[in-house]
Image (cartoon, rainbow, N blue to C red):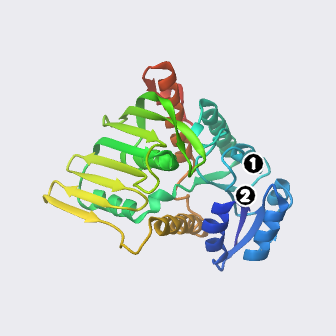
Amino acid sequence: MPIKLAIIGIGKVAREEYIPFLASQPDVSLAYFNRTPDAARKAAEQFGGKSLASLSAVADWKPTAALVLTSETIRRDVATSLIQGGVPRIFFEKPLVAAAGQAHVTEADFADARDMLLLAKQRGCQTAMVFNYRFFEQTLAARKAVADRGLGEVIHVIGQVHFACWSHCIDLIHFFAGPIEEITALSGNVARPSPELKIEARDVTAAFRLTNGATGTIIGTCGMKWRQPLYELVFTFQNGRIHMRDLDGTLEILDGSTEAQESRTILRHTSRWDQYRDSFKKAVGAYVQSLRDDMPPPVPGIDGLRELQFEAALKRSALQRRPVRLSEEFPIEGL
């Protein structure tokens, strides 16, 4: 059965990472909506498909799914309109909602996103997230190592993360270690600039406990140099350790059972940005395949809410200088 996908928001990432791959799929038909109509018309001319004049026209087109690739600052209003219009499936870029931008997530963003997902559930609209870092080769290899080598449960997590990768790395912690129960955070006094993101933000440092009793720490900053690794995550398991570094960079596996130490890295002629672009193809390809198979999405929308739950709890903890229990103060039960 043909798949009809509505692309909402024709920005740089949509044009370079999403649309070329989707346009190459023989069973996919595309339509485009953008607040600037000319961008939608140009996309239709370049990649094929049709441009749509309004969000109501998107709903009237009866898409299989809508990919909401707008700025996070307007994503909630756009998605809410699509849900109310009866669109049956919505795929979100990350973060799910951030009215002041991804470096400045607030408690209100979490509340708005929770209300939006609740509305989607009530209307029978299935939601999904991109979180393409899950599709890096190092992430896939790390998950396989955990399963094949019997590394056991996570007992500790360490993260140092540029804000460009922040929501992705929070998701990776959930992906490998499970839900977070409590968080205690501090905010720095200096706002550090990121010329690449055109923002500045204060460093944050958080200690957290997972529901399985494991503990962890994470630092978020704009102070890491762009040409250096943009994130490092270390997961210590009962029977080993995994160290993940940068955009599909070096993966180190320490296997306590076999006393083996292995390292995986990309070939020198391969850019991390090649790997970054490739991860979008794999993430979007997995989502499209779930539509073909009429199966749940590989990354459900609630995982985007869990990421915002972490950020909201971190902000409250840093502001009020106390531990915050996520399930009590930012509940997501019932979604």
Q: Is residue 129 left or right of residue 99?
A: left
- Three-letter code for the amino acid on which mark 2 is drawn: Gly
- Three-letter code for the amino acid on which mark 1 is drawn: Val
The local secondary structure at tag 1 comes to helix
Which residue does the image show at 59% across and 65% down from the upper left? 294
Residue tagged by mark 1?
78
Rendered-image quadrant of the N terminus: bottom right
Which residue does the image show at 53% across and 63% down from the upper left? 283
- CB-based contact (under 8 Å), mark 2 and mark 1: yes
Q: Is residue 55 left or right of residue 315?
A: right
Q: Residues within 10 Å of mark 2 (few under 14, many from 20)?
A: many
Residue tagged by mark 2?
9
- Whether residue 2 appears in this view of the structure is no
Q: Is residue 266 left or right of residue 190?
A: left
- Whether residue 294 appears in this view of the structure is yes
Please state the horizontal and vertical placement of residue 34, each as a whole percent of the image: 78, 58
Please tell me which residue lies in front, 30 or 295: 30
CA separation, marks 2 and 1?
10 Å
Reply above or below: 149 against 103.
below
Q: Image quadrant of residue 119? A: top right
Of circles 2 and 1, which is in front?
Answer: 2
Specify which label sits upstream in the sequence, 2 or 1.
2
Which residue does the image show at 44% across and 48% down from the upper left? 169
Rendered-image quadrant of the C terminus: top right
The local secondary structure at tag 2 comes to loop
